[in-house]
Amino acid sequence: MNFSKRMIIILAGVLLLVISWIVAVTAKTDVHRQEALLKEAREFIADNSFIRAYPILEEAVELNTKHQLQLDAENELKKVYLELIDQPGFRRKYIDLLENQLRRDNATQDVFLDAAVYYIEVRRLPEALAILRDGIERTDSELLIELYEAGRYVYRVILTDYEYIVAGYNNTYQVMYEGLWGLARSDGSALTPFEFDKISTFSGDRAIAMIKNEIFAVDYYGNRILLLNGEADVNSRRTPELHSNVTDFGSFGNNRVTLKINGRWHRGTGDFEIGISNFEMIGMHSSGNAAAQQNGKWGVIDGAAEWLIQPIYDEILMDEFGRAYMQDAVFVRNGRSVSLIVDGEMLSGTYEDAKPFGEENYAAVKNNGLWGYIDTSGTVVIPYQFEDALSFGQHLAAIKVEDYWGYISLSGEVVIEPQFLIAKSFSKGSAPVQTESGWQIIALMEYLEDGGLF
């Protein structure tokens, strides 16, 4: 190696040492400066002179030393901002600082706790719960879990004039008003006119409705988009009928609808294309499958109308919509005995009654006159203790205690006290309940988009 190359290497090494020394000295100086600013600010805080403390703390925070002092300065600044929160600009400053802390990969339990408590105090529970969920996922903090559980079941009551409300499906309710049916949104507001003798669940971009004996498809707002039966005038703008002999219809889901034609039930697609197979009865499709009756016996058909479970049972247990098959499981009855079939195999043990599985892995079952809960292995997960019960949906299940309905969590704890004459399953954050005043909707604050609705 010649002399010039050696000199370049030596100079580069010296330059690296100088840079490292400058960085170290600067970092040390910043830490000392931050420490001095923090001490000065605390003296003002001790005298309750928050207006003088905050610019000093802001200067300390801007040094961004990555030292413990940095977090100390930020926490002191948050406290000062809270003291000044009602003065112009300080609420925004406080929220910005919270958000900066939450964005960090190393955000601690206390950061999430401070943010959640603030949003709870200003009555913005949905934001608080979202922060707690994030904090639980990132820190696995028991304290955050406890606070989340305490808030996640808070609900708002939505008053209605409806005479009856079916459980929620696809963000809508089938509701009856003054003896006629229509659809309502999950917040209880009317979606379609109340002019139908019957209306199905809403799926895709349509529902099926009936006025007198005329059956047709309607869009999200109740506009007629397709006539299914009747005599269409070819000179009018009405769409010709698809199946002139349709006399009834069932629930609509999984892009499948059931239509009664010439006394037999047929399964149709969302475009009302009818398959060859027909049955004495068909339930609503869920998880791609549906209960069906043939020759007086019940089984389960798949998406191609082939028998997934042979029709050898007296009954397939279904919910209010006619859904039977969820979590790859279905309850069947022969005589007085109810059994559970999972993945096509019947498990040991029988029940007096049962409710189909819902969105969660717990189903309500009855033995010795009381209701409890099992999972898909047949294991009892919540003891038999209720007068009546529904299966779980959205981590909640309706239970009946001393003639009134309330809700339990997955742990079996009562989280909404029994107070309703009837309670139905939660869907998309809300559930219909009947009280002495009539039908209402209770909506979990966690799922309300606008917040601040206490």
Image (cartoon, helix red, strand yellow):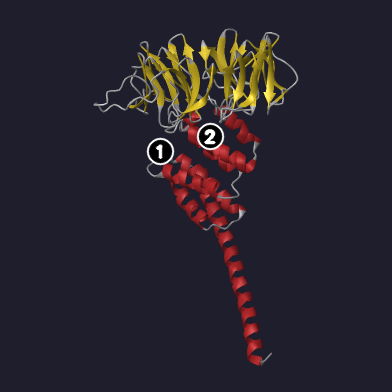
Do tag 2 and tag 1 residues touch (Cβ < 8 Å)? no
Disc nearest the viewer among 2 and 1: 2
What residue is rendered at 50% in x and 17% in y? 264
**Residue 78 screen position, x and y as percent:** 51, 44
Residue 107 in the image: x percent, y percent? 59, 47
| Residue 425, x across and y down, in percent | 54, 21
**Which corner quadrant holds the C terminus?**
top left
Name the residue rendered at 74%, 17% in the picture: 349
- Residue hosting label 1: 86
Element marked by disc 2: helix
Amino acid type, label 2? Leu
Q: Secondary structure at mark 1?
A: loop
- Three-letter code for the amino acid on which mark 1 is drawn: Asp
Per the image, the residue denoted by label 2 is: 129
Left or right: where does residue 67 sit relative to residue 58?
Answer: right
Q: Nearer the viewer, residue 405 or 335?
A: 335
Please state, as top left, top right, bottom left or bottom right, where the N terminus lies in the image. Answer: bottom right
Residue 92 seen:
yes
Residue closest to the far bottom = 2
Closer to the chain start, of discs 2 and 1, is 1
Q: Reply above or below: 286 against 338.
A: below
Residue situated furthest right in the rendering: 348
Left or right of 196? Residue 37 is right
